[in-house]
């Protein structure tokens, strides 16, 4: 199998998985009507990281297949955030979140130094989102309604994107981000499974 074929497979599989990545979490949330174990802070930080990342890729006209899944992920995260706010009785806050996200998205591309600075902070922002979810799990010792499948699939897409980045742009900032995200996604997945198993033993 040639390198081009593997690259196409990595791009396609990542896009396909990301089209449904958040669906398991969304379905679990709708079914339970409870946000136990889900960190709003984590979700908001993840959204910020996604917005910065896709804005950077588009600003510098990187090949669309290397970031095409991010608008899809942003849309799914928005749905997830709205559901969380709804079940927590805070749906009115969605207007504030929308204003902040749209305003920030526009500000990112006003100057090249702004998007470059934002991208340099993007890894820290995205890492903070994963650490916020881990903190939520550690404090509650309950995986609650957190979907292990969603986090497991995110780990796979991160690994696929490490490969596609190496084979296309070679951008070190982007590469470091994917490496860090893959490690943290796997850590969250393992923590969810651990607390779920511990909860089952107690039952």
Image (spheres, rainbow, N blue to C red):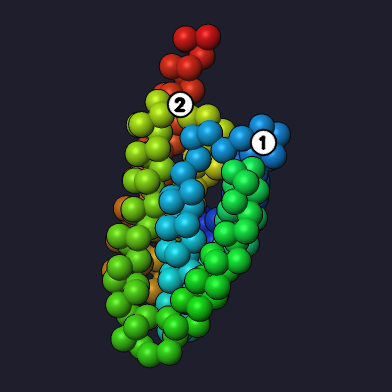
Q: In which quarter of the image is residue 119?
A: bottom left
Name the N-terminal-most of marks 1 and 2: 1
Residue placed at 35% from the left, 60% from the top?
125
171 is higher (above) or lower (below) than 82: below
Give the crowd class for mark 1: few <14, some 14-19, many >=20 residues within 10 Å. Answer: some
Q: Residue at x 45, y 26 (%)?
A: 142
**Residue 66 higher or lower than 25, as above or below:** below
Report whether 124 appears left or right of 189.
Answer: left
198 relative position to 92: left or right: left
Tell me, for residue 142, which label it has, or none.
Answer: 2
- Name the quadrant containing residue 96: bottom right
Q: Residue at x 38, y 57 (%)?
A: 126
Q: Which of marks 1 and 2 is in front?
A: 1
Whether residue 154 is visible to the viewer of this picture, yes or no, is: yes
Residue 12 point in image, percent of width and height: 59, 59
Residue that badge 1 annotates: 33
């Amino acid at each position: 199998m040639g390198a081009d074929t593997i690259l196409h497979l990595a791009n396609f599989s990542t896009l396909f998985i990301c089209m449904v990545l958040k669906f398991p979490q969304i379905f679990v949330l709708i079914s339970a009507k409870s946000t136990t174990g889900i960190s709003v802070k984590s979700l908001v930080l993840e959204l910020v990281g996604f917005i910065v990342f896709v804005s950077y890729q588009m600003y510098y006209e990187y090949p669309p297949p290397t970031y095409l899944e991010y608008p899809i992920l942003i849309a799914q995260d928005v749905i997830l955030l709205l559901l969380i706010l709804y079940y927590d009785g805070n749906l009115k806050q969605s207007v504030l979140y929308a204003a902040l996200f749209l305003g920030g998205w526009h500000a990112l591309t006003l100057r090249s130094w702004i998007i470059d600075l934002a991208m340099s902070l993007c890894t820290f922002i995205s890492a903070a989102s994963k650490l916020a979810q881990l903190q939520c799990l550690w404090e509650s010792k309950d995986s609650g309604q957190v979907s292990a499948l969603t986090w497991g699939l995110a780990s796979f897409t991160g690994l696929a994107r490490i490969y596609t980045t190496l084979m296309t742009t070679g951008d070190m900032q982007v590469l470091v981000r994917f490496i860090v995200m893959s490690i943290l996604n796997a850590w969250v997945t393992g923590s969810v499974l651990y607390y779920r198993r511990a909860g089952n033993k107690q039952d």
